Structures are given as structure tokens and as C-alpha cells.
């Protein structure tokens, strides 16, 4: 057994034994009701799987916490690309078992989530396990597919879109690239330009010339301390024969996370009410600016805080009298739209981020017809 697997198994056994010892009480054995199989992890994310590396495997360890021997009757998967291997022997109480799952990436690319059902004599209905990751197929023409070149590395897109982020947990995205250099590269341990809310790992740690690899980029939206559309630009330091830098550009949309509100508490939170969700300025001239108003009210019993208000264009300016509204308090936001250089039907937006947990992000659409 590999060293890492032995260490992982030993750690799990020690943790389980410690838990059992700390929870022990003086009872007769016939009073103890077995709780079935206890899994170290019911979900394993294997990250990015490059097609040229072949099948990837994941280990699901479990301990028999019944008072009798247990054996696995069958393991079922929801895809032919996922195969499970397991011991057919009986497992005594308190012993650790293993289900090894192999994923074959020779299928459609993208994120995947595979269901594995483990049926045992202790639980015939089956325990549900999940294998997740990102399948990265090998392109027919790497030169064309990785057409964006940066310091000899080829990327698919010039900007990495992380999508929608929430402040409750970091999000990781795997970005594949091709090393077109004629020398191997690795990521430097010192990254002077890397922002504190971003962490980057290169998989594998050393990328040979003429081969693919993956940047694992983890973005912590809470540390960014911003909301709405955000952009980050920085350089990653790589090591080869000498130090070189590769520029990275990210974009994302950040939303504040709020825990679900119980039904009996929906009337006990701040509530942002926007009277005008769509404003039609009508027919206007491109020669002069036009102003409008948005009426805001806190209809909840607790203070309301406007975290941020943003427009989707520099041509739309606004003034916020205050960011805080007491219960029942109202205010008017005045905006000015400069249509200079624009023609035809036009739509602009104002987006409001607040501590209203039911509607933390609300958008007002401002329409016009410009001559």
C-alpha cells in the first residue's frame, strides 16, 4: 500500500477509535444498536482529470460500526465511465474497509458528479457516495485550441471567468493550459503579485515541455470585500532555467451569502422596497443629459444597510443620500444619464446590494429611446 494511503488510513482509524473511546458508556452489548457503515467522506472531488493521464481513482474509506460482521453485496454506479472495486470479504466490527472508484475521462468534457450506491447486508437500501471533478478532454489541435499565448503558455481564453461567487465559501476553478515552451516549468513558491484572496496551485507541480497542465485557482470572495462585477489582474511567477512571469486576468460576480430565513421570521428582517423597478425616460436627445429618481424604503423592522450601488455604465451617475435606512424610513436616489454618442433603444441598470436577506441583490432597469 502506498505511504500516503497508509497514513490516511491510520489517521482515520485513530480518529474513529478516539471518538468511540470518548463516547463509551457502561452498557450491555445487547443494548447497543449498530449504526451501519460510517464513511470517512461521502463526497470526493478529484479535481481536474486530463484525458491523456488516463483513469483517475478515489478512495472511500468506511468503518463497520455494527455489532456484527458486514460485507458489501454490490456497488452500483450511474455511468459506465465509473467503476468500483471493493473487497468481497466480511468485515468485523470496528474494522476499516475501502471502496476504490475509478473514473475514465474518455467521455464528454466538463464538470461531473457521479453517484455510487454501496449496498451491504447492514444496509440493503445502500449508502450514497459521490465522485466529482472536471473532465478535460484532449483537443484535436492543441496549437489552435490553446490560441491565447502568454509567456510560452497556451490558454483557451484571455480572461478566466469564475462565474458567480458567494461570500460564504471559496470557489475553485481549474484552468487548463499547454506548455509550448521547449523547457519544463514549475510554479515559484514566492508570488509577490498574488492577491490575498486568490490562491493558485499548478497540477502537476512540474510541467514538461510540450504537455498540458492545470492551474487550480481558488478565489475567496469574503476576503475580496467587494460585491457585484469584479476584475483581478496579476502575474504568476514561474521557474524554468530562469524566472518568468505569466499574466492572469480574472472576472467574477460576487454576491453576499445569507443563511435561509425560517418562514416564521420572514417579517423580522430588513426589507428593501424599490418603488420603480423599471424607469422609462421616453424619447430623449443625445445632446443633453436626463435625470431621474428611484424611491427606496425599508419596510422591515430592522435597520437596512445598502452595501453597494453600481451602474453598468460610466454614463449613468447617481448620488446616495445615505447607506442606512431605519425601519419605515424612505429616501430618493437621483441619477443622471448622459446619452452623448448613443443612438436608438438603450437600456442601463442600477444594481442595489443590501442586507435584505430575502432580496440581497435588486436591479432597476432604465430605458430610453435616443435620437
Image (cartoon, rainbow, N blue to C red):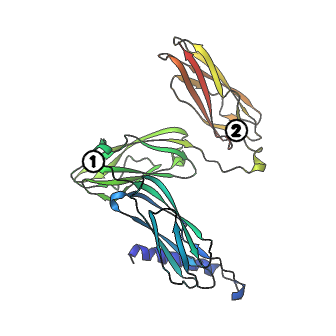
Q: Position of residue 38 (x, y in %)?
A: 59, 74
* Residue that label 1 marks: 244
Asked which quadrant contains residue 159, the reply is: top left
* The N terminus lies in quadrant: bottom left
Q: Position of residue 329 (x, y in %)?
A: 75, 32
**Residue 203 visible to the viewer:** no
Q: Residues within 10 Å of mark 2 (few under 14, many from 20)?
A: many
Q: Residue at x 39, y 75 (%)?
A: 3
Contact, CB < 8 Å: mark 1 with mark 2? no
* Residue that label 2 marks: 304
Q: Residues within 10 Å of mark 1 (few under 14, many from 20)?
A: some
Residue in front for this viewpoint, 293 or 139 = 139
Alpha-carbon distance for marks 1 and 2?
49 Å
Image disc number at residue 146: none
In the image: residue 305, left or right of residue 253: right
Residue in front for this viewpoint, 40 or 271 = 40
Q: Residue at x 74, y 41 (%)?
A: 302
In this rendering, the answer to whether 341 lies above or below 205 is: above
In the image: residue 141, left or right of residue 49: left
**Marks 1 and 2, the one that precedes in the sequence:** 1
Residue in front for this viewpoint, 3 or 68 = 68
Q: Position of residue 182 (x, y in %)?
A: 21, 51
Q: Position of residue 247 (x, y in %)?
A: 34, 43
In the image: residue 252, left or right of residue 239: right
Q: Secondary structure at mark 2?
A: strand
Q: Secondary structure at mark 1?
A: strand
**Residue 327 visible to the viewer:** yes
Residue in front for this viewpoint, 253 or 91 = 91
Asked which quadrant contains residue 201, the reply is: bottom left
Amino acid at each position: 500500500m502506498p505511504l500516503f494511503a497508509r497514513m490516511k488510513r491510520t489517521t482515520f482509524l485513530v480518529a474513529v477509535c478516539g471518538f468511540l473511546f470518548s463516547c463509551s458508556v457502561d452498557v450491555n452489548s445487547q443494548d447497543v444498536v449498530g449504526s451501519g457503515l460510517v464513511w470517512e467522506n461521502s463526497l470526493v472531488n478529484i479535481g481536474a482529470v486530463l484525458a491523456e493521464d488516463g483513469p483517475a481513482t478515489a478512495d472511500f474509506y468506511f468503518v463497520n460500526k455494527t455489532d456484527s460482521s458486514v460485507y458489501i453485496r454490490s456497488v452500483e454506479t450511474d455511468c459506465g465511465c465509473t467503476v468500483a472495486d471493493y473487497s468481497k470479504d466480511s468485515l468485523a466490527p470496528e474494522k476499516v474497509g475501502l471502496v476504490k472508484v475509478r473514473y475514465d475521462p474518455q467521455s464528454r468534457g466538463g464538470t461531473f458528479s457521479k453517484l455510487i450506491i454501496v449496498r451491504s447486508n447492514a444496509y440493503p437500501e445502500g449508502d450514497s457516495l459521490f465522485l466529482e471533478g472536471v473532465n478535460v478532454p484532449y483537443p484535436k489541435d492543441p496549437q489552435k485550441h490553446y490560441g491565447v499565448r502568454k509567456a510560452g503558455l497556451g490558454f483557451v481564453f484571455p480572461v478566466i471567468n469564475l462565474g458567480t461567487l458567494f461570500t460564504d465559501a471559496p470557489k475553485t476553478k481549474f484552468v487548463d493550459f499547454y506548455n509550448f515552451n521547449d523547457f519544463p516549468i514549475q510554479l515559484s513558491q514566492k508570488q509577490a503579485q498574488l492577491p490575498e484572496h486568490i490562491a493558485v496551485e499548478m497540477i502537476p507541480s512540474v510541467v514538461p515541455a510540450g504537455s498540458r497542465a492545470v492551474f487550480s485557482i481558488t478565489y475567496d470572495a469574503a476576503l475580496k470585500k467587494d460585491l457585484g462585477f469584479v476584475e483581478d489582474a496579476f502575474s504568476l511567477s514561474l521557474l524554468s532555467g530562469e524566472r518568468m512571469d505569466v499574466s492572469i486576468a480574472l472576472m467574477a460576480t460576487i454576491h453576499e451569502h445569507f443563511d435561509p430565513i425560517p418562514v416564521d421570521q420572514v417579517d423580522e428582517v430588513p426589507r428593501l422596497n424599490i418603488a420603480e423597478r423599471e424607469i422609462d425616460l421616453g424619447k430623449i436627445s443625445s445632446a443633453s443629459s436626463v435625470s431621474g429618481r428611484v424611491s427606496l424604503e425599508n419596510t422591515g423592522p430592522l435597520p437596512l444597510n445598502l452595501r453597494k450601488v453600481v451602474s453598468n455604465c460610466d454614463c449613468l451617475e447617481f448620488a446616495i443620500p445615505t447607506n442606512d435606512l431605519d425601519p419605515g424610513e424612505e429616501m430618493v436616489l437621483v441619477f443622471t444619464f448622459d446619452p452623448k454618442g448613443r443612438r436608438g433603444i438603450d437600456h442601463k441598470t442600477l444594481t442595489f446590494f443590501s442586507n435584505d436577506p430575502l432580496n440581497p441583490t435588486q436591479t432597476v432597469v432604465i430605458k430610453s429611446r435616443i435620437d
